Amino acid sequence: MPLLWKRHTSDVTQFINDLKAKKPTLEAEQRAGRALLWDKAIDREAQAANSVSRVPQKPYVYFGSGK
């Protein structure tokens, strides 16, 4: 291995680095989009009420009663 060995950077990594350099607000926009769709506060009371009111499903729901 030569002394002046250069670390390899993949094409995908180069593309992402170039994209971030061209558009510095990209990560902030991604975080805002994630917060809009995914990062929601969980209502624990509603979640508990939903789990309590759940009716257990019978096995083999797609088959008849076997008569």
Image: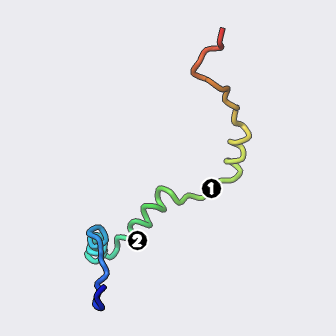
Q: Nearer the viewer, residue 33 or 56?
A: 56
The image shows residue 10 at horizontal and vertical percentages of 29, 71
Please tell me which residue is depicted at 74% across the width and 40% down the height of the picture.
52
Label 1 environment density (alpha carbons within 10 Å; few <14, some 14–19, many ≥20): few
The image shows residue 47 at horizontal and vertical percentages of 67, 48
Q: Which residue is mark 2?
A: 28
Please tell me which residue is depicted at 50% across the width and 57% down the height of the picture.
38
Q: Secondary structure at mark 1?
A: loop
Amino acid, disc 1: Ile
Q: Earlier in the sequence, mark 1 or mark 2?
A: 2
Amino acid, disc 2: Ala
Say above or below: 1 vs 20: below
The image shows residue 4 at horizontal and vertical percentages of 28, 90
Which image quarter holds the N terminus? bottom left
Please tell me which residue is depicted at 34% across the width and 73% down the height of the picture.
25
Which image quarter holds the C terminus? top right
The image shows residue 26 at horizontal and vertical percentages of 34, 70
How many numbered marks does the figure carry?
2
Please tell me which residue is depicted at 53% across the width and 60% down the height of the picture.
39
Q: Secondary structure at mark 2?
A: helix
- Tell me the colour scheme of the image: rainbow
Q: Which residue is mark 1?
A: 42
Q: Nearer the viewer, residue 45 or 34?
A: 34
